Amino acid sequence: MNISATNNLEAFWMPFTANRQFKKNPRMFVSADRMHYTTSDGRQVMDATSGLWCVNAGHNRPRIVEAIRQQAGELDYAPAFQMGHPKAFELASKLVAMSPTGLDHVMFTNSGSESVETALKTAIAYHRAKGDGSRFRLIGRERGYHGVNFGGISVGGIVPNRKMFGTLLTGVDHLPHTHDLQRNAFTRGIPEHGAELANELERIIGLHDASTIAAVIVEPVAGSTGVLVPPKGYLQKLREICDKHGILLIFDEVITGYGRLGAPFAADYFGVVPDIMITAKGLTNGVIPMGAVFVKNEIHDAFMTGPEHVIEFFHGYTYSGNPMASAAGIATMETYQEEGLLTRGAELAGYFEDGLHSLKDLPHVIDIRNIGIVGAVELEPIAGEPTRRAFQAFLDAYDKGLLIRTTGDIIALSPPLIVEKSDIDFIIDTLGGVLKALD
Ligand code: PMP
C-alpha cells in the first residue's frame, strides 16, 4: 500500500514523534496478533514493548475483542454523572478484589495522565476534607514521568516535558532520582545502593514543614525514563517517612500495574502499599483508553460526610467508567486471571534477565538493568548528539522485525506477558545484532 498516496501525512501532528523524520519514511502498522504487528508493507514485527507498555496480554485477544463488540451493540454510552451502568461497578469490584490491601475504592479516568491529575487533586482535597487545608504542597522526583497534563509535568522531572510550558504548578519539590551508574551499573534486579536517597524527603519536609505537604508521588519503577529500579529499601523508607509526617504516598503504577513485574502491582512486588495507586494502560490491555485510581478507605470515607444529596467530590470525566472501556477492562482482567499473566513474569524473569545481560559486552553498552519482564540497555551517548545512537538502534531493529522503545540513549524492552522463551531469544538476538552494527 502506498501510504502517502492515500493519506495526507501532514494532517496528523503526531505525539512525541520526530514528525519530519517520520513523514519522509513512515512506519505504519495495519494489524496485530499476539506478539506481532504487521506493517503496511506486509512485514511481521515482534512487539517487544507491549505497544506503549500497555498490551500486556498481547494483541487481538478474542475475549476482549468480543466483549467490546457485544457492549457496543448493547449499551454504547451512559452518562457518567448521577447515573450508573452495571459494567463499571463490575470492573471496579474486580479491581479492588485484586488490589493491595486497603485500596478498596476506585475512580475511573481515560488515561494515565488523567489518573495522575485525579490522584493529585484527590490527595489535596482529602486533607482539606479532613479540615487540614494547609496541606497543598506536592513532591515528585527527578526523572519522574507522570503524563503530560499540568499537574503531571509539575511533579514530573523530565526537562523537555516541562521547559516549554511556563511556570507549572507552584508548591512542588522534587526528590533526587535514584539512577546511579557509578555504584549500580549492570545490576540484575534491585540495586544495592541508594536507599539513603529517600532521606532527601526529610530535607524537603524540613524546608517547608510537614504540615504544608499533601503527597509524595513516585513511579515505583520509573519506566519512561529508562527502567530505573528503586534501590533496596528505598520505597520502604519513603513509606516510613510519609507515615511519620501524615503525608500521602502515591504510586504511579501506569507501567508497573497489571503484571509487569511478575506480581499484580509493584506495591505487591515491593511489599509497600501506597495511599493512592494510579493505573491505566494494562487495565484494558491498551485496547480502549481507560485509567483507574485506587484510593485507600480512609481517603474515600473522608468525603462521605454531609447531606446525602450533595455531590461529595467535584471531579470526573464524561467518559469515566465508559461502558465499552469497562467491558474491555473486565475481559482483560478475566484474560489475565485465566492465563495467570499477572504472575507469569515471575516465572520468566530469570530467563529474560539472563538474555538481557548477555548483551553486556557489546559496543557502547554502559548499563543493563531489569526487573520482572521489563528491562533496559543504556548506550553511551554520542558527544553533541544525544539520543542519535538509540534512535538508530530503534530504526535498525524495526528493519529487522523488532519493535523496541527508546528514551534518550536508553533502549527499553517490555514484551507482552504472553512472551515465550523463543520470543525472548529472538528479541535478544535481534537487539544484539543491531547493537553490534552501531557506530
Ligand atoms: N504515568 C506513567 C508512569 C506513565 O508511564 C505514563 C505513560 N507512559 C503516564 C503516566 C501517562 O499515561 P498516558 O499516556 O495514558 O496519559
Image (cartoon, rainbow, N blue to C red):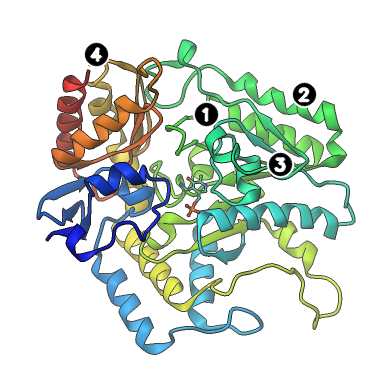
Q: Position of residue 13 (x, y in %)?
A: 40, 55
Say which residue label 4 marks: 361
Looking at marks 2 and 1 on the same chain, the residue that comes earlier in the sequence is marked by 2
Q: Is residue 109 above or below residue 69?
A: above
Say which residue label 2 marks: 203
Say which residue label 1 marks: 230
Looking at marks 2 and 4 on the same chain, the residue that comes earlier in the sequence is marked by 2
**Residue 33 visible from this viewpoint:** no
For image coordinates 50% across by 75% down, the residue present is: 322
Residue 73 numbered mark, or none: none
Q: Is residue 176 above or below residue 135?
A: above
For image coordinates 65% across by 54% down, the residue present is: 119
Say which residue label 3 marks: 167
In terms of secondary structure, where does tag 1 sit? loop
Q: Is residue 327 above or below residue 249?
A: below
Residue type at mark 2: give it. Answer: Arg
Nearer the camera: disc 3 or disc 1: 3
Given residues 416 and 348, the one toward you in this image is: 416
In terms of secondary structure, where does tag 2 sit? helix
User: Marks 3/4: CA distance?
Assistant: 44 Å
Looking at marks 3 and 4 on the same chain, the residue that comes earlier in the sequence is marked by 3
User: Marks 2/1: CA distance?
Assistant: 19 Å
Nearer the camera: disc 3 or disc 2: 3
User: Marks 3/1: CA distance?
Assistant: 29 Å
Residue type at mark 4: give it. Answer: Asp
Residue type at mark 3: give it. Answer: Thr
User: Marks 3/2: CA distance?
Assistant: 24 Å
Point out the residue furthest to the top here: 182
Marks 1 and 2: in contact by CB < 8 Å?
no
Q: Position of residue 47 (x, y in %)?
A: 24, 47
